[in-house]
Image (cartoon, rainbow, N blue to C red):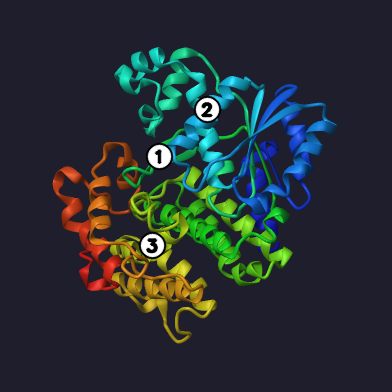
């Protein structure tokens, strides 16, 4: 079985008939929408390159007899104002379903907007114990399981959503996550809830052909971060073997096909889509941790994928004593790709030395893509480090600390004692700043 065939099999076993993916499948959107009724709302991508595919979706809806209205999607990182606008328009149109067409930002925005249009502020205030000043906002839902609490308390289901992915990146079309950004403070926050996983998803990998180079690179690195962060945090967990299998396969598909995908080789584009979709599978069996947490505070200077790519090697060094098996597995992939010297015997290296060797391979890979390899080089400042440290103490982002293979406790002073050194290392490029626990 080829790597692509294995990936397809894994995804089909996981999502079953909830997910249609491959080449020339965009016309299946109309059929998916018809399952939920005769009226839908199209929330279109804000990216001009993706809008050319909108007509194929409209034609598929008309063929199935589904009427529709079209509104604009979200800008990158889904700013709050875009979320509230989309929620208002869903409320005004009252469609049977909502189709989100775009990358992670638009899909995440629609997930959150549907939540806002489903539950009344009075219900939110009573169930989640928040004041009326925030009960009609998105804030009470940040964290884990808040939407499910509302669903169970009211007995009210969310409006059906069809997520149509256009970028090999976040796998937002397959997952329980919604990232929303407050541009005023430059901070992203996260909803984590099974209830917001789209019941139907479509990804025609062919639509990624011609995508901007920066988007392709950022998406690939986001996929790698999903795979690697979960795999690192899976140490000692009952899902470790599955996580490792998904990670090794996803790494091979992404790393070995990324350069050809940039040249718009269709087979490579399919491989990249499968690899980042496996990243989505990964974050549904486990959770991301340090690099994703840090990226939430860098939205004003870095795209999400690049922020994760810069932070990932430094957290790899920090976690290295607890992830020896994982390091050998992915280190071999970087070695085969030429980013770790051929004569390096990975299995003879121990603990931190192994971690630094693999981290250097990651950095070399990032350099080969033209990515910055330190936060300072990327334009971040000392103020961003403070912002990241403060965000790590936010209870609504606590799940990221718990997902680490070396969990950190803010109340025990772990943020200052350990995370501060990791972030300083990521800022300067100096591994010696990292104190392992």
Dot 1 alpha-carbon crowd within 10 angstroms: few under 14, some 14 to 19, many 20 or more: many
Dot 2 alpha-carbon crowd within 10 angstroms: few under 14, some 14 to 19, many 20 or more: many
Residue behind mark 3: 312
Q: Earlier in the sequence, mark 3 or mark 1?
A: 1
Q: Secondary structure at mark 2?
A: helix
Q: Marks 3/1: CA distance?
A: 19 Å
Q: Is residue 92 above or below residue 278?
A: above
Q: Earlier in the sequence, mark 3 or mark 2?
A: 2
Q: Secondary structure at mark 1?
A: strand
Q: Is residue 207 above or below residue 91?
A: below
Q: Nearer the viewer, mark 3 or mark 1?
A: 1
Between 89 and 110, the one nearer to me in the picture:
89
What mark, if any, has residue 190 been given in the picture? 1
Residue at (82, 32) in percent of width and height: 62
Find residue 123 and report its horizontal and vertical position in percent. 40, 13
Find residue 222 and report its horizontal and vertical position in percent. 49, 56
Find residue 212 and report its horizontal and vertical position in percent. 61, 61
Q: Nearer the viewer, mark 3 or mark 2?
A: 2
Between 98 and 397, the one nearer to me in the picture:
98
Residue behind mark 2: 87
Q: Are marks 3 and 1 in contact (CB under 8 Å)?
A: no
Q: Is residue 15 above or below residue 214?
A: above
What mark, if any, has residue 207 been given in the picture? none
Residue at (20, 52) in percent of width and height: 415
């Amino acid at each position: 079985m080829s790597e692509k065939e294995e990936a397809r099999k894994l995804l089909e076993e996981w999502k079953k008939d909830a997910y249609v993916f491959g080449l020339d499948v965009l016309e299946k959107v109309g059929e998916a929408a018809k399952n939920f009724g005769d009226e839908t709302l199209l929330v279109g991508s804000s990216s001009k390159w993706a809008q050319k595919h909108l007509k194929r979706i409209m034609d598929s809806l008309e063929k199935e007899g589904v009427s529709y209205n079209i509104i604009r999607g979200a800008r990158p990182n889904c700013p709050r104002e875009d979320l509230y606008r989309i929620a208002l328009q869903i409320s005004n149109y009252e469609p049977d379903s909502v189709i989100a067409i775009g990358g992670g930002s638009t899909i995440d925005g629609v997930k959150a907007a549907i939540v806002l249009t489903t539950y009344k502020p009075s219900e939110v205030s009573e169930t989640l114990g928040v004041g009326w000043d925030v009960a009609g906002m998105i804030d009470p839902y940040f964290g884990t399981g808040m939407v499910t609490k509302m669903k169970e308390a009211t007995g009210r289901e969310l409006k059906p959503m069809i997520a149509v992915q256009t970028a090999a990146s976040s796998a937002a079309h397959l997952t329980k996550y919604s990232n929303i950004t407050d541009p005023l403070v430059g901070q992203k926050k996260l909803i984590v809830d099974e209830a917001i996983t789209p019941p139907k998803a479509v990804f025609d990998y062919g639509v990624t052909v011609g995508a901007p180079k920066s988007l392709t690179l950022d998406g690939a690195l986001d996929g790698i971060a999903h795979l690697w962060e979960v795999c690192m945090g899976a140490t000692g967990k009952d899902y470790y073997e599955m996580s490792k299998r998904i990670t090794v396969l996803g790494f091979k598909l992404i790393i070995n096909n990324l350069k050809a995908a940039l040249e718009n080789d269709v087979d490579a584009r399919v491989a990249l889509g499968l690899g980042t979709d496996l990243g989505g599978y990964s974050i549904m069996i486990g959770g991301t941790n340090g690099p994703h947490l840090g990226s939430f505070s860098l939205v004003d200077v870095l795209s999400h994928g690049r922020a994760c790519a810069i932070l990932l090697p430094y957290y790899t060094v920090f976690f290295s004593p607890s992830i020896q098996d994982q390091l050998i597995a992915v280190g071999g992939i970087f070695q085969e790709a030429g980013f770790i010297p051929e004569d390096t015997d990975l299995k003879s290296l121990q603990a931190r030395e192994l971690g630094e060797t693999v981290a250097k391979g990651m950095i070399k890979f990032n350099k080969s893509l033209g990515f910055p390899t330190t936060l300072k080089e990327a334009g971040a400042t000392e103020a961003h480090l403070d912002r990241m440290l403060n965000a790590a103490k936010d209870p609504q982002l606590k799940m990221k600390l718990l997902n680490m293979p070396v969990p950190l406790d803010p109340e025990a002073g772990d943020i200052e004692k350990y995370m501060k050194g990791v972030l300083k290392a990521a800022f300067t490029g100096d591994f010696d700043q990292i104190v392992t626990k």
